[in-house]
Amino acid sequence: MNTSDSLDAKGRYGGWALVAGASAGLGAAFAREAARLGFDVVLLARRADALEETAASIRADHGVATRCIVADLARDDIADVVASQTSDLDIGVLIYNAAAELYGPFLTLDHQSHRTNLAVNCFTPTVLAELFGARMRDRGRGAIAIVSSLAALQGARYLITYGASKAYELILAEGLWDEFGDHGVDALAYVVGATSSSTWHGAAADAFTDAEGLSALQARILQPATTDEVAARLFTVLPHGPRQYANLADEAAALEAASKPRAEVVLTMSGVTTGLARFAHLPKPTLRRS
């Protein structure tokens, strides 16, 4: 399954697609792919200008309807906000791509940054899955994809809280796959590795200078998938939970790592995060939001 044409997602799920974290990058790619497949699209994010620009581009390119919800996904009442602004829509697919990436030595990070990371990566996907899961149960079909990360598969220095919160998303989606399947609703944990974007190009190449000494995982980081590739694959694997990988090479690496001692696996990933820290003149505490 290499192209999204192998699944008639619109015919299977119907309705609108809602993408959380849709203003740019991978989230925008998910929204564009949904529109290409014929879905009308709800775009949810906190940056109004970027969100409206992405929505306008989707309308122009694909002729579908769009709706923008400008909201911070860390807010306590996010489910109420989204519910009120989608009450008249038939949501057939929810893609939760929003993320807060907390980076830096654990003891240097402040309480509010931890709280934001956990709100965006744990609380909000839970309450949105509850909101739309109930609607999809009542309509008898639908799909929920929660975008996790290779960082969820092991601990690593400088990404401790982020990795732990993405592991929560991974297990959340897998459990939903089992329960929601009773109601004809698909759920999927979608594990995404290195993905090229406007901020990625050149970063990894500068982070690792000893090419001959790279581990297999570090070598994968140097060859990221494109956002369009990641988005297209999601729509081929939506019915095939509980877990799928955006890149088959990542899946092979994950299976190989599962057979190794945990200390080795953690230290290997820490080598990646340390290399990136050198490139970015880190470690210093940062909180990035999609």
Image: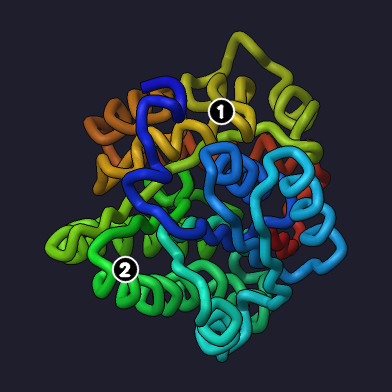
Which of 270 and 43 lies nearest the eye of the viewer?
43
Left or right: 96, with 131 as reference point: right
Foreground residue among 272 and 126 = 126
- Residue indicated by mark 2: 136
Q: Which mark is residue 16?
A: none
Residue 50 in percent (x, y) is at 83, 58
- The amino acid beneath tag 2 is Met
Residue 271 in percent (x, y) is at 56, 36
Q: Is residue 279 positioned above or below 212 on the image? A: below
Between residue 134 and residue 160, name the one nearer to us: 134
* Badge 2 vs badge 1, beta-carbon distance below 8 Å: no
Left or right, 71 with reference to 268: right
Task: Please identify the quarter of the rendering in which residue 285 is found.
Answer: bottom right
- Above or below, 127 against 169 in this view is below
Measured from the top left, where is residue 254 in percent x and y? 34, 33
**Residue at position x 63%, y 60% in the image:** 21
Residue 86 vertical placement versus 267 (above, below): below
* Left-right relation of 273 to 239: right
User: How many residues crowd around disc 2 within 10 Å: few (fewer than 14), some, or many (20 or more)?
Assistant: many
Picture quadrant of residue 194: top right
Residue 245 drawn above or below residue 30: above
- In the figure, residue 288 lies in which quadrant? bottom right
* Residue 201 shows in this picture: yes
| Disc number lying in front (2 or 1) | 2
Q: Is residue 264 visible?
A: no
Q: Residue 229 carries which label?
A: 1
Q: What residue type is labelled 1?
A: Glu
The residue at the far right in this view is 49
